[in-house]
Image: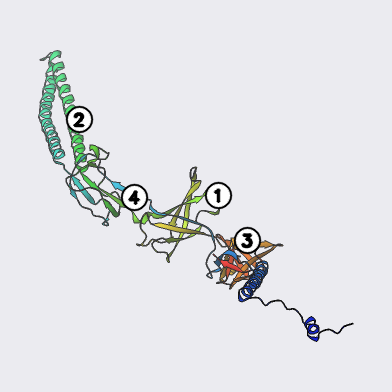
Amino acid sequence: MGSSDPIDDLSALRIERAPLPTGRSWGRWVFLALLLAAVGGGAWWWTHRVVPIEVEAASVTQRAAGAQASVLNASGYVTARRRATVSSKVTGKVIEVNVEEGMAVREGQVLARLDDSTMRAALALSRAQLEAARRAVPEVEVRLDEARLVQARRERLSKDGLVTAAEIDTANAEVNSLVARVASMREQISVAEQQVALQQTAMDDMIIRAPFSGVAISKDAQPGEMVSPVSAGGGFTRTGICTIVDMRSLEIEVDVNESYINRVSDKQPVSAVLDAYPDWQIPAKVITAVPTADRQKATVLVRIGFNELDPRILPDMGVKVTFLREESAEATPAAARPMALVPKSAVVSDNGRNVVFVITGTTVQRRAIQTGGTDGDRLEVTAGLASGDRVVVSPPPALAEGAVIIVK
């Protein structure tokens, strides 16, 4: 066996190493590693994420001590039971208007005058005819007295046989004729008097007076214009002088849905708030519900009277009314303390208990409450909530204790 070269033996023991990657290949491996880490982290977050639930919120309010609970809310307008557009009985030309908007008028006050020149002439003629009829009567009465003297004289002579029966009949006929003529003339005088009264009435119709005391809210005619009780003249003739409202007859008219009319009764207390004065609560009461329904709107008209009128209350103002629950004597102690109120839609039933979800930051807390009566669209809360708490309205089925929420 021959001897081997030591250099070749050492070369056989050497370990072959793979070439190191270049800088470009190293960056690709790092990118792939980071991409895999990001995908894995995203998958983990997606499977473990917390999705907020979008909800609606409402605040718990408080009814003041002694205040009555409401059973129904409605809106309507202030109206006047006595309101009239004053016009004339006849067609004529306006020569004088004595009223302005906002002026207080009293019953019988002269508001306007029409041209009465023709009526004045007709009245003068009637008065002259009456005077002529009256002057003709004394002449006939004198002739009647003379005829009666002749009649008496002939009756005395007839006893002595100095006059015939025919002459007596003639004297009697003359007396009867004059008596009938005097009666006829007296009737003519009465007719003439009635004619004068008629013309005087026509003269009075030229003066337009206030039918009742109130306030003029509009002035519809000016001197020189024609006015008529009916529309005439192609729109150039006025049909009224002014409009008067009796401010003592102001009340409220509201339309109540017929489904809730059973909550309204006569003399029921009402709280009214004018749109012009939203912070002013006006005490009122139901006068009556008009016993008929509007089939198109499915509503019933309810009349409400103010307990006390105020100059700030004006006709046709918008008003919102709250029909109050009439408290019984047993309910008086409960009404003497403040009461928390929560929307009905915020309360859900869970195994016979009333539960609400109270908002605490970005989560909700499930809380059992005790409720009392109703107050409009709200419930009275006797325990479990305080004024100022925020609750979820119409809680979604997925809402649970501790759920993360976002308030709309």
- Which amino acid, mark 2? Glu
Choose between 324 and 118: the one closer to the eye. 324
Q: Secondary structure at mark 1?
A: helix
- Which amino acid, mark 1? Ser
State yes or no: discs 1 and 4 in contact (Cβ < 8 Å).
Answer: no
Choose between 142 and 316: the one closer to the eye. 316
Q: In the displayed structure, would residue 1 be above or below residue 70?
A: below
Name the disc covering residue 83, or none.
Answer: 4
User: Residue 59 is drawn in which quadrant?
Assistant: bottom right
Instruction: Give x and y (percent) for residue 369.
Output: 65, 68
User: Residue 374 is drawn in which quadrant?
Assistant: bottom right
Label 2 to label 3, Cα distance in Å? 95 Å
Label 3 to label 1, Cα distance in Å? 28 Å
Label 1 to label 4, Cα distance in Å? 32 Å
Q: Which residue is mark 2?
A: 187
Q: Closer to us: mark 3 or mark 1? A: 3
State yes or no: discs 3 and 4 in contact (Cβ < 8 Å).
Answer: no
Name the disc covering residue 396, or none.
Answer: 3
Instruction: Give x and y (percent) for residue 238.
Output: 24, 43
> From the image, which quarter does the C terminus lie in?
bottom right
Label 3 to label 4, Cα distance in Å? 53 Å
Instruction: Give x and y (percent) for residue 47.
Output: 68, 67
Name the disc covering residue 282, or none.
Answer: none
Q: Closer to us: mark 2 or mark 1? A: 1
Asked if residue 367 shows in the view, the reply is no
Query: For this view, does 399 lie left or right of residue 322?
Result: right
Q: Residues within 10 Å of mark 4 (few under 14, many from 20)?
A: many
Q: Which residue is mark 1?
A: 259
- Which amino acid, mark 3? Pro
Q: Secondary structure at mark 2?
A: helix
Label 2 to label 4, Cα distance in Å? 44 Å
In the image, farthest residue toward the right: 1
